[in-house]
Amino acid sequence: MSKLDEVYAKLQVKNGAKMALIVLDGLGDIATQSQGWLTPLEAARTPNLDALSCSGSAQGRMIPVAPGITPGSGPGHLALFGYDPIDWQVGRGVIETLGLGIELKNGDVAARANFCSLNKEGLVTDRRAGRIATEVCERLCTILSSNITKIGTTKVLIYPGKEHRFVIVFQGNGLEGPLTDTDPNREGLMIAEAVPTDPSNVGQANVAQLIKDFYKLALPLLAAEKTANGFLMRGVAHQPNIPTFQQRYGLKAAAIAVYPMYKGLSQLVGMIKIEGPETIAQQFERYVAEYDNYDFFFIHYKYTDKSGEDGDFAAKVKAIEDFDAALPIFLARKPDVIAITGDHSTPCALKGHSWHPQPVLLHSKASGSDKLVRFTETGANSGSLSVFEAKYLMRLMQANAGMFDKYGA
Amino acid sequence: MSKLDEVYAKLQVKNGAKMALIVLDGLGDIATQSQGWLTPLEAARTPNLDALSCSGSAQGRMIPVAPGITPGSGPGHLALFGYDPIDWQVGRGVIETLGLGIELKNGDVAARANFCSLNKEGLVTDRRAGRIATEVCERLCTILSSNITKIGTTKVLIYPGKEHRFVIVFQGNGLEGPLTDTDPNREGLMIAEAVPTDPSNVGQANVAQLIKDFYKLALPLLAAEKTANGFLMRGVAHQPNIPTFQQRYGLKAAAIAVYPMYKGLSQLVGMIKIEGPETIAQQFERYVAEYDNYDFFFIHYKYTDKSGEDGDFAAKVKAIEDFDAALPIFLARKPDVIAITGDHSTPCALKGHSWHPQPVLLHSKASGSDKLVRFTETGANSGSLSVFEAKYLMRLMQANAGMFDKYGA
């Protein structure tokens, strides 16, 4: 724990306050000429967000990880949850597995895998096996998982994904990541060996041996296949032992998310998944229903990111307006502290995640008012929260909730 | 390398994008009543900068080193080049030597020196030898350098500067700095001994002995002089082994600077010096001519700092307007990313460098627009880049150039 984290921990008190972190995935955007120099948030009609902004809110922008770094959903959310995303690196295999809705325990090792095509010499001829249909992938995963359930004392779990993608999980003792990929990254080469990134790490050496053994067992099972007769592994890593919300903040936290990835990420930090809701209105209704049962609510909305990834400005505006229209359901039961933000920006012009600081609105009795009549990127530039690292948002929320004692006399 | 730098290094990709860092030395300023509460940048007519600001640019302000720290040109530029100026301290002797246009190799030890006056007892009676004329300084340096070329296996090089100033360079193996000054800092004292700052450092001990030997050889050569019969050494340090732009960023970088100091500083990080241009218009013309040969251009403009040091508000306004008038030559061949900023502020009211964050304008297809119609200190205060440490500018430029992969899944 850093010296600063130790200070936060010492100052922390329990007071029963309620908080909600509402994440519009990929909310932030950039103003471009083709859209009249407006961002989607600026172009959208958002009467409810505007009213919230006018009724005593602070605004600012948050650097998701560090200047210029574009985060994936994993680091983006870890930062929002208050965990330094440089200190807590979660492997791609783990994130992918969580994304399939599969629960992992601390220490489980997970890898993303692709079915691939091998020629007679064992050289990779197609790294994605011609993007086989999902049903083929499911059939091949069943072949593997029904034949390989254990290697020594280690449990082996195999789950199909979309098209050629699947994940492999090793559950056992003394396992650790990360290891290098077995994907040679281009065709015409042999399947690579998974090598420990730290040569002195025994847990990584154990996993290296497991992967060798797994290939020996698995490749013969695929030998009869025409295209998908091999597979490549990437992002081999273990689920780190992250302190839970309860341990770190003394908060009983619930996650109301629709997509598996975000349920999985919230589970990494020990949040309770609330299943059922499919629309943002249903998510807010469920929040109201569960209000008394938790201290902290993480509510995740996906469609802002989706439309940003598609480069669909109108769809992103619509996603924001849909969100805004549902917001009164949430506001009917205002918690003590509300934070509304994104996990990063997903500018339509870039059709992908970006490093641009996402706007954040913080509303509580203690937030003060920045006298901004709307919640937008440009307005947030002159907000009292200024630009800060996303990992501090939780600390600001705790402070606004009155959860910190004074530091020193 | 810090953990964060390791992350940047891992995410870095080569994509052939072109970048230009344009530095108006000492650009930043402060608004004072005597100038109608305007800074020179605010008072200047800058139609070309204004147009650039309006065509999709982000703005902010940069802390050159740390809050309240006024940098010299060395730390100011190292930060702009993306090197933490607290981690990478370049001795004054090295900076002074570079400023004379002399090339140094990594490990060379350089010291600033002043001729001084000594009385019969060897006490310093004038620390600047009555500010002898530059020609006298040149004559004395010739006496020293023609008589002393080596001490043991170490080469000794002596170069005259202005008035009483000169530099001494030791080239050899196993030499290291920094050492304390031989300047006693006031008259009436003996020449001090140069002492290693780290008593256990062998390289520093070697330099301490060299300096003793050098005094033994040099003082008799000056004994006949009336005023300049001694000398004092300051800022004894070696040129650190800084990773080059090529090593750190994978970029082939060129420096188009007029003053030797800035050529020298760019050389410290492995930039190629482009010689010839004398005016900013010529510098921009040369940039256009060399466009295809480099990935990164550092273009340095001196006159904003000069006028600031003189406290000449009108001259600083004129320097900015001259720069702006030449800017279209540069803009005729826009690189993918443009950053326009200073290495620090040089407020006219303070007649010197200062700690005030300098304004920065960042322009690329991915920069977005802050909808600011001019580039000024006051406008930059509400820009999306906010206030950040200058050492991160390179990271933002890389991000804007698409030179970083996504971090995590």
Image (spheres, coloured by chain):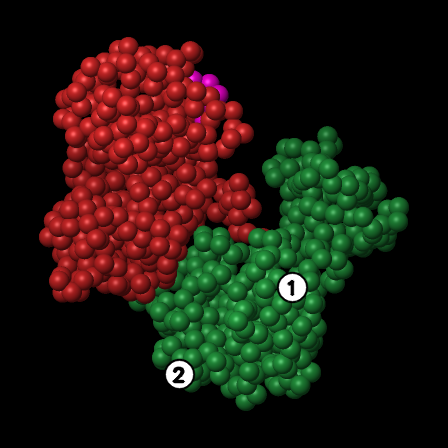
Chain colours: A green, B red
- For marks 1 and 2, the one nearer the N-term is 2
User: Viewed as shown, does residue B29 lie left or right of A282?
Assistant: left
B7, A179: nearer the viewer: B7
**Residue B356, position in %: x, y?**
30, 55
Mark 2 residue crowding within 10 angstroms, few (<14) / some (14–19) / many (20+): some
Q: Nearer the viewer, mark 1 or mark 2?
A: 2
Residue B393 in view of the camera = no
User: Viewed as shown, does residue A269 lie left or right of B342?
Assistant: right
> Which residue sits furthest bottom?
A332
Q: Residue at x 53, y 51 (%)?
A: B406
The residue labelled by disc 2 is A54
Q: Quadrant of residue A387?
A: bottom left
The range drawn in magenta is: B172-176
* The label number, if any, that marks residue A265 in the structure image: 1
Callout 1 amino acid: Leu
Height in image: B296 above or below A288? above
Q: Residue at x 28, y 24 (%)?
A: B122
**A299 drawn magenta:** no
